[in-house]
């Protein structure tokens, strides 16, 4: 790794940490969350169960956008270049195959987890993650929109800005995918509360990091990877909605 790549990595990791801290730390205490929920609900008329799904999403998206701007500026990257995609039927086919492959690899990883621990409750672990539980309290349509939008920002940052900056710093492709993917995976794990949640999200994050990273390399654009990640997140969050009643009931109003 070159010196420029090492400095860029340090800046990107620091920006990622600041982003997650902005999202996680201010509302980590239940007492603080309850006070904020009551204050926002009383001033806006918003149902209490919707406060943190909306507020948390806005904070998360804002943090991701700010981190992207900072790291793009540091790395001399251009948003138009990162998103530019000359679409052909071949590219569309590759996008569809990549999305299917990500789902298949995730299912394979979960099947191994079930083989090792037959009584593992993967859907329960997923819906038990705080931010997912809160999203499932939203109306049905928003359970697609919110995770898809958050995933789009994550993908732009990790496979667009982070990966693109490493490649521009002459980092080998395998190392660039590994570094940006590892940072993404650690960030997802830090948003969990139990070992099982961490394992499930780590496995799915590794799949997305590798598959979407390779897609960006092949296509020369982060846009198809955004489409894959957004559809992946929306689908798997929505399929967990069969547990929405017990989960939503557990979310303080």
Image (cartoon, rainbow, N blue to C red):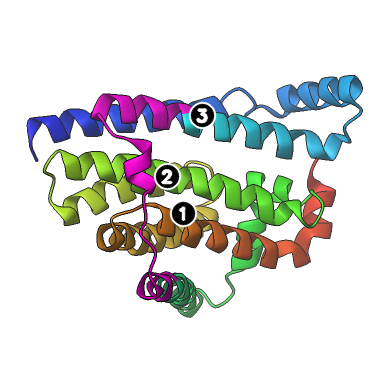
What percent of the width, then of the height, locates residue 83? 39, 47
Q: What main secondary structure does the magenta stretch of the protein show? A: helix
Q: Residue 72: in sight, yes or no? A: yes
Alpha-carbon span between mark 1 and mark 2 = 7 Å
Residue 124 in magenta stretch? no
Mark 2 vs 3: CB contact within 8 A: no
The residue indicated by pointer 1 is 226
Q: Which residue position holds label 2?
A: 156
Which secondary structure lies at badge 3?
helix
Going from the N terminus, do you reach mark 1 or mark 3 first? Answer: 3
Above/below status of 124 relative to 94: above
In the rendered image, residue 26, in percent from the top left (x then y), is placed at 61, 22
What is the crowding at mark 2: few (fewer than 14 residues within 10 Å), some, or many (at least 20)? many
Residue 50, percent from left and from top: 80, 39
For the question of whether residue 253 can be seen, the reply is no
Residue lying at 67% horizontally and 57% vertically, measured from the top left: 127
Q: Do the numbered discs 1 and 2 sit on residues whose CB atoms are within 8 Å?
A: yes
Q: How far, Cα to Cα, is label 1 from label 3?
A: 18 Å
Q: Quadrant of residue 168?
A: top left
Magenta span covers which residues? 66-95
Q: Earlier in the sequence, mark 1 or mark 2?
A: 2
Badge 1: residue crowd in 10 Å (few <14, some 14–19, many ≥20): many
Q: Are marks 1 and 3 in contact (CB under 8 Å)?
A: no
Residue placed most toward the observer, 250 or 61: 61
Which residue bears the numbered disc 3? Answer: 63
């Amino acid at each position: 790794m070159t010196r420029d790549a090492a400095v860029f990595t340090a800046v990107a990791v620091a920006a990622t940490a600041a982003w997650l801290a902005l999202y996680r730390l201010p509302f980590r205490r239940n007492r603080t969350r309850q006070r904020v929920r009551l204050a926002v609900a009383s001033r806006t008329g918003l149902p209490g169960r919707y406060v943190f799904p909306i507020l948390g999403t806005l904070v998360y998206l804002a943090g991701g956008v700010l981190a992207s701007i900072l790291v793009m500026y540091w790395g001399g990257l251009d948003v138009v270049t990162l998103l530019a995609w000359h679409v052909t039927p071949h590219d569309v086919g590759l996008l569809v195959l990549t999305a299917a492959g990500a789902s298949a690899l995730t299912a394979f990883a979960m099947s191994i987890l079930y083989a090792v621990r037959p009584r593992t409750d993967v859907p329960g672990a997923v819906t038990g993650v705080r931010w997912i539980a809160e999203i499932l309290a939203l109306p049905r349509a928003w359970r697609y929109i919110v995770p898809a939008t958050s995933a789009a920002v994550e993908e732009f940052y990790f496979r667009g800005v982070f990966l693109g900056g490493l490649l521009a710093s002459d980092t080998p492709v395998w190392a660039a995918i590994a570094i940006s993917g590892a940072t993404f995976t650690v960030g997802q794990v830090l948003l969990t509360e139990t070992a099982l949640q961490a394992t499930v999200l780590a496995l799915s994050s590794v799949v997305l990091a590798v598959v979407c990273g390779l897609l960006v390399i092949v296509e020369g654009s982060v846009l198809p990877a955004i489409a894959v990640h957004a559809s992946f997140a929306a689908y798997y969050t929505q399929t967990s909605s069969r547990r929405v009643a017990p989960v939503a009931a557990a979310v303080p109003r």
